[in-house]
Image (cartoon, coloured by chain):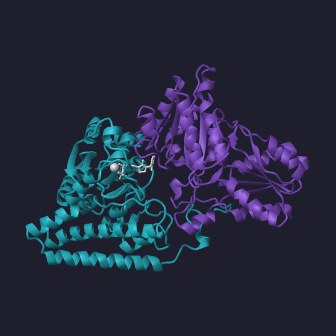
Chain colours: A purple, B cyan
Amino acid sequence: MAIITMREAISQALWEEMERDPKVFIMGEEVGVWGGTYAVTKGFLDHFGAERVRDTPIAEAAIIGSAIGAAMAGMRPVAELMTMNFAFSAMDHIVNQAAKIHYMFGGQMKVPLVIRAPGGGGRQLAATHSQTPDALFAHFPGLKVVAPGTPEDAKGLLKAAIRSDDPILYIENATVYQQRGEVPDGDYTTPIGKSKVQREGKDVTLVTYSKMVPYSMKAADELAKEGIDVEIVDLRSLRPLDMGPVIESFKHTNRAVIAEEGWKSFGVGAEVTARIYEEAFDYVDAPIQRVAQKEVPLPYNRHLEQLALPQVEDIIKAVKEVMR
Amino acid sequence: MEKQDYLELYHQMVLIRRLEETAAELYQKGDIGGFLHLYIGQEAVSTGILAARQEQDRVITAYRDHGVALNAGLPVNLIMAELLGKETGVSKGRGGSMHMADVSKNFWGGHAIVGAHIPIAAGLALADKMEKRDGVTICMFGEGATNIGYFHEGVNLAKAWELPVLWVCENNHYGMGTPPSKASAVSEIIQKACGYGMPAYDVDGMDVMAVKNMVADRLAEIRKGSGPQFLEVLTYRFRGHSMGDPERYRTKEEVKKFIENGPIDRYHKFLTEQKIASEKELTELQKKADKQIEEAVKFAEESPEPADDTLFDNIYVEDLEGGA
Ligand SMILES: Cc1ncc(C[n+]2csc(CCOP(=O)(O)OP(=O)(O)O)c2C)c(N)n1
Ligand SMILES: [Mg+2]
């Protein structure tokens, strides 16, 4: 077991998969000479060369569109969008093309594509550059959406995504690249579409994913001091969504909080809550609470931005609320 | 041109330079957050353009917008306050560096999604045409932005509908770390305009008088009904793309070469050699700019932060009973 950062985990997964399979290649804005906007692909150009580490024009539709084409023709592209916010400039290709092609042509073609994109707020980048639109992408059947919350899963899920034959949106969070954690030695993959209990507890089920995993861990540590024992279920994949561990946990805690960074309306919390009510209504002891971003485009001002974003304290408050 | 007009251009360029140098310092101190794109090296471009525009001409640009904001007549105090995220800022601290605007000055904003404002500019011009106003919309963007689909859709539409737009491409040789030779089908951006059937020109963007005269001619023709025109302005940014750019893509010698022939030094030399202004007069203007910036910092620092209860202001025009 080594302790590495989120950034290193993603970088290692890419590196190892490129070494393993010559059909894997990277494309995106500033992935080569610059070394990646968030330094994830630093050193890749020198090692793998410009054929496989392709700097692209600022042209998101062309990046995703051409990656889809290359994937259809047998390559395994990993297309990097500089941020999730620029996915909107490639929306048609993600939603109408990548997510539809396999089904619509009766299974003849496949699109083994990975789209990497960091999202999230908290860096004072203002409304267009700070979004967490994860739930939006999870809406479309045909697209898989994963969003790791620990270095171990970051590495394992990316490797699994690259080896998968389906188009996958791999969501990173720009504020947690330095987050550290243990990863297993050697080659391993993390199954796509499998939730995981990251911390066991008996009092309340805290469902979360991505950046809210470390936030939830902190909240759980605080709550433990007050004698509240939190069980954390990390969704890891939003589509397919694995409710198994959530329901299992809920059946013994009878209380749940869902924490996500994106907006609450029509969000991940809404989906998970509805499913708990559908699948385990008889076990509900308290109204389920959701922790999410306030319903506002994120402002530049640091204080207002933090006010709008979900904080560890919000999670603690919500847990206490369901424990009342 | 009167002597006063010549001096005014000098003053504006120096004021932009001081503003940007100070912004860089404030960023290092942590007083400015988010992304900060400096205009140092490109001062003659917006100064020349805005000197040629008439009141009824709209201007819209990308995120590298501080210079345009100053030249368009936005008070430097309010620009500085926006950089510090204060309630008194031009965008009330919600937009930050990349999103300055003042509709009362016919400045329709800095826009941070590359190329997204290009079709918007076509729409501004469409409204003027439909309402039979004689304003021209001046739309500025980087050479990197000419590789995104928005550019092609926007300029095509403008020509198809003969809209009164002056497209101004600020070719500063790089889009982040990527030169046109690696990302654009043609390195002379002007050739792209030819593909859309519009008159196209280029001008030395380090020469403020050349820019001003060129833009005045273009605006006059468009006002007479020529339809949209295209102008490529050759320029260079002396600093990194934004703060924290490792600048692996260019050499120090290259940067030095451009700095030695910078727009302010060149204009300074022109004014003294042509005996339009004395050294003393120009030094006075520099001092005036220093003082203005000093006062602006003071104003911004003393300005109030936005209040917590204003977080939800301006999400919609109309008040909503149900919240956002
Ligand atoms: C759609 C989109 N893709 C990527 C980015 C990230 N980005 C911001 S500025 C920039 C470079 C733009 O270069 P250019 O148009 O030449 O303008 P310059 O920065 O040189 O003024 C990139 C890639 C973005 N803001 N929007
Ligand atoms: Mg450029």
Specify the quadrant that holds the C terminus of chain B: bottom right
In the rendered view, would you say A281 is above or below B274?
above
Position of residue A152 measured from the top left corner of the image (x, y, whole percent) = 66, 45
Q: Is residue B241 above or below residue A47?
A: below
Q: Is residue A210 left or right of residue A73?
A: right
User: Which picture quadrant has residue A309?
Assistant: bottom right
Name which residue lies at 54% across and 60% down.
Answer: A123
| Image coords of residue B102 (percent x, y) | 40, 65
Q: How many marks?
A: 0
Residue B9 in sight: yes
Residue furthest to the right in view is A282
**Is residue B205 something one can see in this rendering?**
no
* Left or right: residue A57 compared with residue A211: left
In the image, B33 versus B197, the foreground residue is B33
User: B71 or A5, which lies in front?
Assistant: A5
Residue B155 higher or lower than A221, as above or below: above
Q: In the drawing, does residue B68 fall left or right of residue A207?
A: left
Residue B192's quadrant in the figure?
top left
State the image coordinates of residue B119 (x, y, percent, origin top left).
40, 46
Instruction: Give the residue displayed 51% in from the left and 77% down from the top.
Output: B304
x 42%, y 61%: residue? B36
- Up the image or down, B87 lies above or below B183; here it is below
Tell me where residue A19 appears, x and y as whole percent.
Answer: 53, 32
